[in-house]
Image (cartoon, coloured by chain):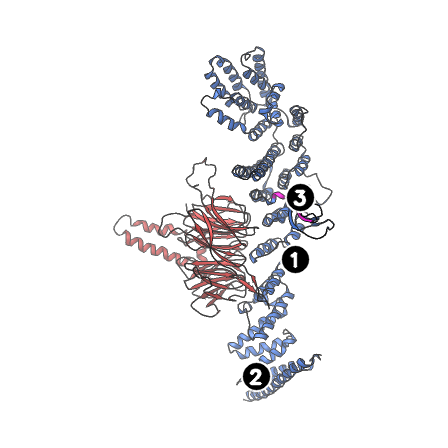
Amino acid sequence: MLGQEQQLICVNSKKKQMCFEWGPGEMLVCETSFNKTDKSEKVPSCPFIYLIRKDVDVYSHILRKLFNESHGIFVGLQRIEEELTGKSRKTQLVRVSKNYRSVIRACMEEMHQLAIASKDPACGHQFSSQVSILSAMELIWNLCEILFIEVAPAGPLLLHLLDWVRLHVCEVDSLSADVLGSENPSKHESFWNLVTVLVLQGRLDEARQMLSKEADANPPSAGMCHILGDLMRTMPILSPGNTQTLTELELKWQHWREECERHLQDNTFAASPHLESLCKIMLGDEATLLEQKELLSNWYHFLVTRLLYSNPTVKPIDLHFYAQSSLDMFLGGESSPEPLDNILMAAFEFDIHQVIKECSIALSNWWFVAHLTDLLDHCRLLQSHNLYFGSNMREFLLLEYASGLFAHHSLWQLGVDYFDYCPELGRVSLELHIERIPLNTEQKALKVLRICEQRQMTEQVRSICKILAMKAVRNNRLGSALSWSIRAKDAAFATLVSDRFLRDYCERGCFSDLDLIDNLGPAMMLSDRLTFLGKYREFHRLYGEKRFADAASLLLSLMTSQIAPRSFWMTLLTDALPLLEQKQVIFSAEQTYELMRCLEDLASKKPESGQPDAQRLQDDIETTKVEMLRLALARNLARAIIREGSLEGS
Amino acid sequence: MEEIYAKFVSQKISKTRWRPVPPGSLQTAETFAIGSWDNEENSVSLWSIGDFGNMDSDGGFEGDHQLLCDIKHHGDVMDLQFFDQERIVAASSTGCVTVFLHHPNNQTLSVSQQWKAAHHHTGPGSPTYSSAPCTGIVCDNPEIVTVGEDGRINLFRIDHKEAVRTIDNADSSTLHAVTFLRTPEIVTVNSIGQLKIWDFRQQGNEPCQILSLTGDRVPLHCVDRHPNQQHVVATGGQDGMLSIWDVRQGTMPVSLLKAHEAEMWEVHFHPSKPDHLFTCSEDGSLWHWDASTDMPEKSSLFHQGGRSSTFLSHSISSQANVHQSLITFWLSTDTAKDRLEITSLLPKRTLSVNSLDVLGPCLVCGTDAEAIYVTRQLFS
């Protein structure tokens, strides 16, 4: 994989040792003490920190379309897997493969437009190199589609290969437009080039039309053109709807070939070197073909043309033999094969693993190998291959690709689905990655939470909610904090927030965030403190509504049931004071006894503390409060006894 | 069959909005604005829809929406609203509210007004602001109301530098969306399943009414008001439920309709055909709710009048009749739900559909899969 270095900061420290650090996602941060270019000589003692991105293409603006669109295709493929059976399976998989290719082509098209429009030459160059990479990817994918997915048998195989070559060697179309657009096509300097290319690509109908133009313009050669045109017309080819067998075709083809040879031996075309060369091409004459290297432009075009005119019913297993010899002949020992040649050769050899391996080395992103491998895996071609680490190759490549997406600021959402379809390590990877996504808004947090909840990742749900709750507490948003801790079912944090609420109440004498506290519902049961908070607020509401009896028994039960924290008892007892002072008797005798017991309980267990002055003052206030309460309780008790006694007596 | 065109735009889309057409004009919608989120650099951009409706089959780029202009936006675009024909108001995750002005002559966008730190937290003990995302905007010339994660409601006027009115701590939890009920009254939804109605004529920080979902406190994410019946309000929740409320009565929703499988991000009544409703969701679906299925019978009465002189009065009365059914439909109970026809508008589900907008026969929506979908034949 290619890397990209990006200079981050210039650290003006003394030359430190070099160190490496695996950053988040795919980034390698390292500190070096040497300079790469002479430009930085001005600051000789300045070590740099470099940020190295492993998967550069993830950051390309246009390739984002490729990633997003292919994500949809990928997910679709995984979902239809169950329905795929028998014959429809192959057609479906071919359709999926074509979808992937059309996405690559669309990207290529856009990148090409940009390269043309770009004013900055460096930028334009970058775009053009991307175009050639995309074009190579599509070329490889298309070949893999023919050989591994379509699995075309002898006969149709060559037709597919012809289409493949026609699609990728497409200069002929602009050449054709150029020639036909001129005033006198047959006098155009590229006229014969065009006819030759058409024959090389097996587009014989078009070649015939061109020949008839030549015949019109040049009457002496009309006869020869007519004969060659007839040969072109009569060449037997396999047509998709035809029912003839391969043997029939071979027989016809043999006859046709003999006729061509006869014309050559009779020197029919001796007067016109162009026509003679065309006839030789149609006989598959290798020397003649190699003369057209320029027009063939590459060895695989040569291979396909050679097969078309020498062995049109080539069997898949024989392909690699022809491919190897074509490559050798075409290069002629002058140059060595390039990575693309090796990849194509591996494909012709039906060595899928070699194809994937070479692609991984040669291409600058994981996108291609991950998607291709996945598709081939769906064709059940990779089952037997297990890696010595982790899981199988499909999963390994998908994990690499998805990790690359997660390293990206916004493409992480796509990565989730890829992890989902990695049965062995996908979930663990997702768990590790998802926790590292920065959550700057609640909306983003909700999206991440949804991802976790759908996959029952309870631990991550809890931690995300906790982060949000902490953030809310820091921002003084207690209501929000409580909501988040309720969602996380985090009792400890709910207790902490409830305490904050109670403390605020003690300081300010009124509750904040009533809209939330009044509507806690069953969530109130999450923690004792939260229950207390809810119930205590309910007491205030009842009191406000002048439902004193209900308020009183609620207040008492808060203490007797031990829900109220002991530190809060004094506040509760103080709250009881106005109830005790009401005209009518609210606390019954029995309730009053309970209250008294609570008070004495509290007073007796007063902790001895060390802070003298402040404590003493506090103690004074406390003592006064206790005295007042005792008095009020005693008076209430008296009233209650009298009232209860007189009621019973009456 | 409605055709829907997709375009990938290399940015995750948080909001899509049609530019309003001038009142009384016969034009259909042709320009829309989109806002992006979660990119390293976010933007607000204006797009024009291609002539794909009339294009012949060999036009290579049919359905291609053309970018008119764009401008950088600091932070995620949390909400986007057209203030008028030229001005767009954007809410940012940085708490900033920005008004962008579109110059049609040279196709550029510029910042014409900005309220920085419109939404912010006041940390405990420290007076410094930490920004809080602004989550929702609603515009009614000349007023702009914004709500945010800080539970604050701001009322701005387009020509004022400072907020005209601010309600601090209006909500203890996050406010997710806001819309106008009647002009001085707004309705907000929050993350604990409450719908609150506020009246700017009243002083103080208390809402004049609180309505809520019972029990589960499911967060509400979006709200829209019926265009003709101002007391009818639709909301969408975290569980994907569609709730219809009658704010005149009760404190609970009138009806709850099971809808999407995840958060409903937006709900919109069709502005001129309010018996049509549109919703989109985190689960990647976009739905068209059609409550007009019994319309043909009613309008057959309409045609009986023929070309006679009684036609006019006849049609008015029958229209009123039809109208009556609209009023009651969204508020009616279970029996009516059979009449509801729901169509899914997107071909396959992928990532979240974050936003949608309808105007006339046109619909635009944007997704996390970085695609914009546009259809111009909603009702054909």
Say which colour chain A has. Answer: blue
Q: How many labels were placed on the picture?
A: 3
Q: Residue at x 61, y 70 (%)?
A: A500
| Circle on res. B302 | none
| Circle on res. A395 | 3
* Residue A213 drawn at (x, y percent): 47, 19
In the displayed structure, A162 sits above or below B159; it is: above
* Residue B272 drawn at (x, y percent): 39, 53
What chain letter is assigned to the residue under label 3?
A
Q: Amino acid at mark 2?
A: Leu
Q: Residue at x 33, y 54 (%)?
A: B318
| Circle on res. A459 | 1
In the displayed structure, A164 sits above or below A249; it is: below
Mark pair 3, 1: CA separation:
24 Å
Q: Is residue B237 visible?
A: yes
Which of B17/B236 is in front? B17
| Marks 3 and 1 in Cβ contact (< 8 Å) | no
Q: Residue at x 54, y 12 (%)?
A: A271
Q: Amino acid at mark 3?
A: Glu
Q: Which residue is mark 2?
A: A580
Instruction: Output the letter for the chain in red.
Output: B
Q: Is residue A339 left or right of residue A104?
A: right
Q: Is residue B100 left or right of residue A361?
A: left
Q: Which residues are magenta?
A: A36-57
